Each structure stands twice: as C-alpha cells, then as structure tokens.
Image (tube, rainbow, N blue to C red):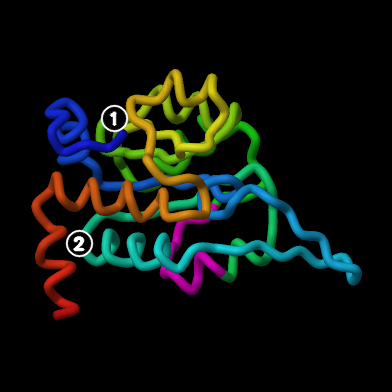
Amino acid sequence: MLNLANIDLVQRARNVRLLVLDVDGVLTDGKLYFLADGSEAKAFSTLDGQGIKMLMNSGVQAAIITGRSSSVVERRAANLGIEHVIQGREDKRIALDELLGQLQLSYQQVAYLGDDLPDLAPIRCVALGVAVANANAFVRQHAQAVTALGGGEGAARELCEFIMAAQGTLDAAQSAYL
C-alpha cells in the first residue's frame, strides 16, 4: 500500500519527474466495450483525471504506454494534456526506454503504474513501480507498492497524490481549490 510512513517509497517518489500509466486495467476497470458499429468505448475515472492534472501542474510529466491502440485513449490523453502517448506496444520496456531517451530521463526519475504481465518489466526497472489493487497477483508480488484502490477506481489519483505528498506539492495543489 502507498504509505507516507514507508521512507523508502517516499524517497523514491521524491525523485519522480515522469509518471507512466497503462490504460486498460489502470485508467479503466479493464473491461473492453465494442459497440455494434465497430467502435470502442472505455470508462475513465474523473478522480484519476484530476489527480493526473494536479501532478502535471506540480511539474511532473505524465505519459501513457498501452498495448492496445484506441482513438478513445488519444482523446482522453488530449483532454488531460498528456503529450506522450505510446499505443499498440506490448514491449513496454522498450517503449519506455525510447520515451526516456526522448525526455532525457533515467529510470530513477520514473514511476510506473500497471496491472498485468506486459507491465512487469517497466514496474521492475523504474524507481517507483506500482501495481493497482486488482492487478494480477504475480505483478503485485513484484511491484514495490500496491495501491489501495483498483484500476479505474482512483488508483492513479492515489499514486499521483502520493508522489505530490512526497515532493511537498500536494497541500498547495489542494489548497488552490479552497
């Protein structure tokens, strides 16, 4: 669980400059909805969206790396202001390496939130590799932390707020709404 009393996790979170998110099972509940006209629908949590926007406003970048390709993901990322969206990549570690090269960041500056086996390599190589509560058991076992909330239920918000709390930016971000 993400706990500010865990000094190791807090230290890891303090150095995060990029949060990388999977989509299906992380930003959504993992269900795929295929409509009669062949289009696809996904449900995203507004809690996660608000957390991602607050995190980006605090100076931490966000990115998406997902194994599937969907115009719905492009639209959601654009809505949130996420510039770095990599779709259709099962080789998420390689995709992450390419992104880090572009951004000139190291693994020690990255948090990754995932839920299933394709997320395992990035979870294991970054500074803060986190699994959602309802992730595959093997993935949870290899993550440095597991959220209390499930994918599509605010898990990304939970991680965003944890990073911001560790970096000392959460209070200011929340106070802006008073």
User: Magenta includes 84?
Assistant: yes
Numbered badge on residue 127: 1
Mark 1 neighbour class, 10 Å CA radius: few under 14, some 14 to 19, many 20 or more: many
Residue 36 shows in the view:
yes
The residue shown at (69%, 59%) is: 70
**What secondary structure is marked by label 2?**
loop
Say which amino acid is labelled 2.
Ser
Side of 160 relative to 168 (left or right): right
When asked about the image quadrant of residue 10, the answer is top left
- For the N terminus, the image quarter is top left
Give the percent coordinates (x, y) of residue 63.
43, 52
So how many labels did they put on this image?
A: 2
The residue shown at (40%, 51%) is: 156
Q: Residue furthest front?
A: 148
Give the percent coordinates (x, y) of residue 3.
21, 36
**What secondary structure is marked by label 1?**
loop
Q: Which residue is mark 2?
A: 58
Side of 146 relative to 168 (left or right): right
Quick check: 91 above or below 34?
above
Say which amino acid is labelled 1.
Ala
Quick check: 35 above or below 128?
below
Give the percent coordinates (x, y) of residue 167.
13, 48
When asked about the image quadrant of residue 171, the answer is bottom left
Q: Residue furthest bottom?
A: 178
Q: Nearer the viewer, residue 124 or 108?
A: 124
Q: Nearer the viewer, residue 132 or 62?
A: 132
Give the percent coordinates (x, y) of residue 146.
38, 33
Numbered badge on residue 84: none
Query: Which residue range is magenta in the image?
Result: 76-85
Precedes in sequence: disc 1 or disc 2: 2
Residue 101 shows in the view:
no
The residue shown at (46%, 56%) is: 84
